[in-house]
Image (cartoon, helix red, strand yellow):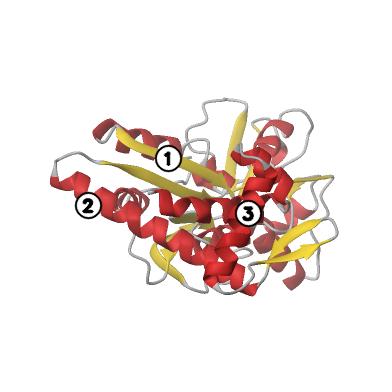
């Protein structure tokens, strides 16, 4: 598939923003890379890059060419998977853009389960916020997205959806742990650590707080849900998370309770792909497995 090498070089330049840096990344000389790019542009009939003082960037034509290349790779991967299925061998690669909440428990379990039956399949897991996950699908950087409260849902084909309540995460000896029902006002009146605004959990908290003429005012704001889980054990504060990211933790010091739905209705955890795209075999089969697992999932902690 040597004909794809020029496209790989174009992608490398777009990623690096510089001919020189891209040449280093691709282990060729800068002059050879420039000749290849210039030759492609002459044959194609138009320039693909804007030449800037500090480097280069794709112009609109280059964006279209790169999108075509990624779509071609996706189609090629799908055909390779179909051919592998003809011989009874399941191979391929699955790329997933996902929320952090899926990392500690749910996704490792699902990947290991799939690979136990199809050890020839490899995975890449890309941690993305809810807007980035959708961009990953549109650019063919990921086959699937598993994200809490997506932003736009443009060209996003929903495969499965499950509700997830926002939970309070805290030490077992925190006063709120003994409450039969936790109200949003309890949380806002209690020192808390919260995810940053680009995450779905924070979006729901901010919206509900504004509805009550309140605001989320965290002592610590972070992009890491792992930090939230650990920090509540260090200081007498509460944090916030969805239950799918908490189920499976065995630390007896850590408990989690849902915020009352009277104040904060559940959000949606959505599994999806790019609309109209035919996924590679391995990705499509893995999506079916995950969709089934989500249907049977229950993340509420038993009293």
* Callout 3–callout 1 Cβ contact below 8 Å: no
Distance, label 2 to label 3, CA atoms, is 37 Å
| Mark 2 or 3, closer to the camera | 3
Query: Disc 2 on helix, strand or loop?
Result: helix
Observer-nearest of 231 and 84: 84
Distance, label 3 to label 1, CA atoms, is 34 Å
Comes first in the chain, label 2 or label 3:
3
Is 159 left or right of 174, judged from the image as shown? Answer: left
Query: Disc 1 on helix, strand or loop?
Result: strand
* Res 261 seen here: no
Query: Disc 3 on helix, strand or loop?
Result: helix
Vertical arrangement, residue 5 with respect to residue 154, above or below: above
Question: Residue sitting at 72 percent across and 54 percent down?
Answer: 17
Identify the residue position indicated by label 3 in the image: 35
Vertical arrangement, residue 229 with respect to residue 3, above or below: above
Q: Local crowd at mark 3 within 10 Å, few (<14), some, or many (≥20)?
A: few
Identify the residue position indicated by label 2 in the image: 82
Identify the residue position indicated by label 1 in the image: 123
* Res 213 seen here: yes
What is the tally of numbered marks visible in this picture? 3
Q: Which mark is residue 165?
A: none
Image coordinates of residue 233 in percent, x first then y, are 71, 29
Observer-nearest of 302 and 110: 110
| Mark 1 or 2, closer to the camera | 2
């Amino acid at each position: 598939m040597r004909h794809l090498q020029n496209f790989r070089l174009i992608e490398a330049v777009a990623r690096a923003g510089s001919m020189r840096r891209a040449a280093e990344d691709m282990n060729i000389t800068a002059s050879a890379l420039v000749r290849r790019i210039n030759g492609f542009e002459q044959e194609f009939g138009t320039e693909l890059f804007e030449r800037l003082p500090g480097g280069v960037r794709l112009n609109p034509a280059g964006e279209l060419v790169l999108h075509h290349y990624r779509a071609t790779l996706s189609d090629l991967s799908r055909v390779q998977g179909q051919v592998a299925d003809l011989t009874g061998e399941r191979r391929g690669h699955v790329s997933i853009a996902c929320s952090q909440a899926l990392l500690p428990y749910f996704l490792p379990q699902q990947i290991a389960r799939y690979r136990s039956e199809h050890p020839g399949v490899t995975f890449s897991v890309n941690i993305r916020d809810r807007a980035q996950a959708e961009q990953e699908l549109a650019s063919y950087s990921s086959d699937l997205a598993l994200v809490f409260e997506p932003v736009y849902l443009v060209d996003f084909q929903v495969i499965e959806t499950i509700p997830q309540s926002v939970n309070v995460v805290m030490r077992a000896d925190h006063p709120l742990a003994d409450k039969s029902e936790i109200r949003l006002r309890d949380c806002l009146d209690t020192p808390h650590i919260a995810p940053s605004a680009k995450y779905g959990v924070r979006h729901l908290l901010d919206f509900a707080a504004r509805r009550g003429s309140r605001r989320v005012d965290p002592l610590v704001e972070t992009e890491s849900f792992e930090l939230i889980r650990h920090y509540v054990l260090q200081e007498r504060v509460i944090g916030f998370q969805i239950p799918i990211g908490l189920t499976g933790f065995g630390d007896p010091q850590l408990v989690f309770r849902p915020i009352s739905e009277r104040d904060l209705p559940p959000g949606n955890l959505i599994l999806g792909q790019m609309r109209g795209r035919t996924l590679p075999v391995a990705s499509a089969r893995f999506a079916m497995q995950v969709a089934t697992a989500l249907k049977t999932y229950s993340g509420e902690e038993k009293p």
